[in-house]
Image (cartoon, rainbow, N blue to C red):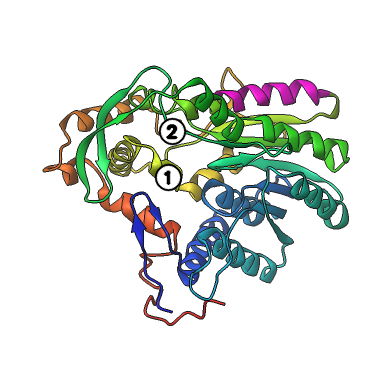
């Protein structure tokens, strides 16, 4: 089959194995060129197949020489349809890592489930003994709890309807978008899916099974962003979940203090992900942010961010945090000169001048790269045997 990108709104329903391999290869090469640093040696990454989770796995493997166990929930190929991008990413990563002499194993299943937690614990006991870092980078639209209840996350506001400029991804024009207000159930359910409850369950299960090293570090990823996006993000349903995630980091530090376990939230920069593309208003903000940060030569993608996290912000002896014990990788994005320029461009941008004030090409290039497309050295005319 000749695999081509099939884009519907903010998602791509196909992925290219050669392109995904190239994506992983480039992130590995970037990390290799940075050299080695001391850090974690046995790392569990929950949500390891795309975005920040994948970049974290690459950064700790090739930057710190770590053995990694990944948890993902991805689809294999069928005779008619390619596998998901995360599946191809993981196959590529394991091929490279094992070829370079690193331990790399992945468990494909629902990370919310007891079955997957049990399987992870069994694998750690058999292969690694204990882990010294747990990265929680899960982005899921729904969660099924052990009692069978299914919770669905919602991208809505919590303080009334919100209307502002947005980017219509179907035709790259600036439109007005209105995001409705969530009800109490939608807020509650979003917190259940994207908050910290499952993160804490993971840490409790791992600690009870005695597969965490004393002094282990655990970390989850979050985002704050500028006041412009507060109604849809920081003060929206997703923001309520992220605040719960932060509160969970405090709970973990208190509850597992006797084991020396330290929990951190890393506040990361806005990047194009499958999740962020779904949030109205945010893609236009990111397109403008990309342009501004590239003009100032401080733009970072996921692998640049994760390398800076593990090389500069996070080490066992000296973790750089703010007054709330959060690691701030959004420091470049939130710089005063950056945000002032973004707001100036935001006020001026419209459908006619969008290329003057927003990096639309950069946004779409990152979007397609996520699914293994638009790499100039990949032969997309090659006939792919799916199975």
Q: For residue 247: magenta?
A: yes
Q: Nearer the viewer, residue 126 or 258?
A: 126
Q: Which residue is mark 1?
A: 300
Query: Magenta region: which residues?
Result: 243-257
Q: Are marks 2 and 1 in contact (CB under 8 Å)?
A: no
The answer to whether residue 313 shows anywhere in this view is no
Per the rendering, the mark at residue 155 is 2
Per the rendering, the mark at residue 62 is none
Which of the image's four quarters has the C terminus?
bottom right
Query: Up-down: is 240 above or below 166?
Result: above
Q: Secondary structure at mark 2?
A: loop
Q: Quadrant of residue 266?
A: top right
On the picture, is 75 further left or further right than 296? right
The answer to whether residue 47 shows anywhere in this view is yes
Query: Up-down: is 286 above or below 225?
Result: below
Q: Residue furthest front?
A: 148
User: Mark 2 or mark 1, which is nearer to you?
Assistant: 2
- Local packing at callout 1 (Cα closer than 10 Å; few below 14, some 14-19, many 20+) is some
Query: Up-down: is 266 above or below 110?
Result: above
On the picture, is 234 further left or further right than 265? left
């Amino acid at each position: 089959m000749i695999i081509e990108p099939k884009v519907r709104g903010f998602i791509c329903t196909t992925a290219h194995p050669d392109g995904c391999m190239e994506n992983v290869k480039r992130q590995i090469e970037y990390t290799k060129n940075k050299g080695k640093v001391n850090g974690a040696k046995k790392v569990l990454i929950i949500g390891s197949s795309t975005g920040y989770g994948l970049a974290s796995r690459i950064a700790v493997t090739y930057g710190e020489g770590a053995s990694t166990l990944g948890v993902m929930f991805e689809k294999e190929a069928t005779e008619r349809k390619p596998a998901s991008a995360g599946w191809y990413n993981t196959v590529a990563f394991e091929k490279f890592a094992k070829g370079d002499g690193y331990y790399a194993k992945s468990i494909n299943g629902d990370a919310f489930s007891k079955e997957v937690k049990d399987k992870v614990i069994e694998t750690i006991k058999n292969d690694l003994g204990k882990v010294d870092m747990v990265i929680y980078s899960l982005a899921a639209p729904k969660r099924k709890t052990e009692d069978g209840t299914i919770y669905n996350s919602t991208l809505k506001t919590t303080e009334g309807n919100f209307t502002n400029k947005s980017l219509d991804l179907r035709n790259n024009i600036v439109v007005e978008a209105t995001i409705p207000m969530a009800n109490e159930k939608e807020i509650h359910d979003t917190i259940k899916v994207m908050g910290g409850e499952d993160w804490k369950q993971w840490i409790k299960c791992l600690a009870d099974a005695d597969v965490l090293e004393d002094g282990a570090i655990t970390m989850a990823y979050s985002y704050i962003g500028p006041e412009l996006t507060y109604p849809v993000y920081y003060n929206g349903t997703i923001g309520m979940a992220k605040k719960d995630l932060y509160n969970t980091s405090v709970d973990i530090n208190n509850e597992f203090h006797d084991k020396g376990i330290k929990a951190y939230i890393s506040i990361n920069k806005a990047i194009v992900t499958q999740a962020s593309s779904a949030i109205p208003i945010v893609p236009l903000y990111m397109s403008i942010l990309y342009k501004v940060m590239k003009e100032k030569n401080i733009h970072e993608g996921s692998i640049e961010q994760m390398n800076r996290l593990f090389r500069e912000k996070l080490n066992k002896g000296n973790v750089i945090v703010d007054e709330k014990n959060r690691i701030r990788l959004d420091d470049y994005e939130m710089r005063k000169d950056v945000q002032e320029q973004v707001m100036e461009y935001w006020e001026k941008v419209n459908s006619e001048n969008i290329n003057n004030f927003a990096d639309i090409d950069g946004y779409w290039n990152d979007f397609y790269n996520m699914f293994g497309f638009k790499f100039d050295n990949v032969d997309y005319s090659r006939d792919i045997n799916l199975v």
